[in-house]
Image (spheres, grey):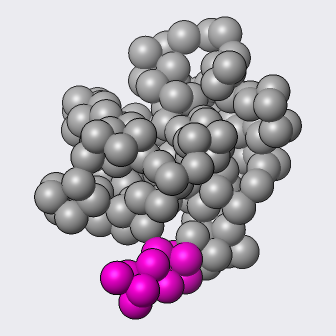
Amino acid sequence: MADLDALYQEVILDHYKRPRNRGRLTPSDRESEGYNPLCGDRVALTIRLQEDETIGEVAFEGEGCAISTASASLLTEAVSGKTVGEAREISELFRELVTGEGDPLADPRLGKLAALVGVRDYPMRVKCATLAWHTLQAALEGRDEPVTTE
């Protein structure tokens, strides 16, 4: 188990230090902003959809802790190329993972997202990990108001 924890920490640090898909897509089809007032994490997602409602590209901007940044970076990799429905399913699986309801090895769709399983042991950090995912849901639903994790 210690080896698995070390691997998870390595994935989180890698995505924190070298976040994937950082930036803003212009033009974009969907976008949303999220804010965690408890710790100051901020994220903005922009999404470019293909004609068949598949997520062609997704990018994020923002400032936050290692967990928040790594989660947003991992999100961009996890949902790119997926349909909107598949992205929603992955989002729900991720929520279950970090809240303690899911088995990180039970569903292969989680992939590297399983690295954030340890967050479930720190309830205050769950909001950091899920901020980008709540923001994704808002973008997919076309909601205009910023998302908060209060």
Q: Is residue 38 left or right of residue 1?
A: right
Q: Residue at x 64, y 57 (%)?
A: 67
Quarter where residue 65 is shown: bottom right
Quarter where residue 77 is shown: bottom left
For the question of whether residue 72 can be seen, the reply is no
Q: Residue at x 80, y 31 (%)?
A: 38
Q: Is residue 130 above or below residue 150?
A: below
Q: Is residue 89 left or right of residue 118?
A: left
List x then y, in percent, for residue 23. 71, 52
Q: Is residue 13 above or below residue 22?
A: below
Q: Nearer the viewer, residue 134 or 120?
A: 120
Q: Quadrant of the C terminus?
A: top right
Whether residue 10 is in magenta: the answer is: yes
Q: How many marks?
A: 0
List x then y, in percent, for residue 142. 49, 14
Q: Is residue 147 left or right of residue 57?
A: right
List x then y, in percent, for residue 31. 59, 27
Whether residue 117 is in magenta: the answer is: no
Q: Quadrant of the N terminus?
A: bottom left
Q: Is residue 27 left or right of residue 118?
A: right
Give the magenta-colored segment's residue range: 1-11
Q: Is residue 37 above or below residue 141?
A: below
Quarter where residue 84 is shown: top left
Q: Nearer the viewer, residue 108 or 121?
A: 121
Q: Residue at x 62, y 10 (%)?
A: 144
Q: Nearer the viewer, residue 33 or 150?
A: 150
Q: Is residue 3 above or below residue 125?
A: below
For the question of whether residue 101 can be seen, the reply is yes
Q: Residue at x 68, y 68 (%)?
A: 16
- Secondary structure mostly seen in magenta is helix
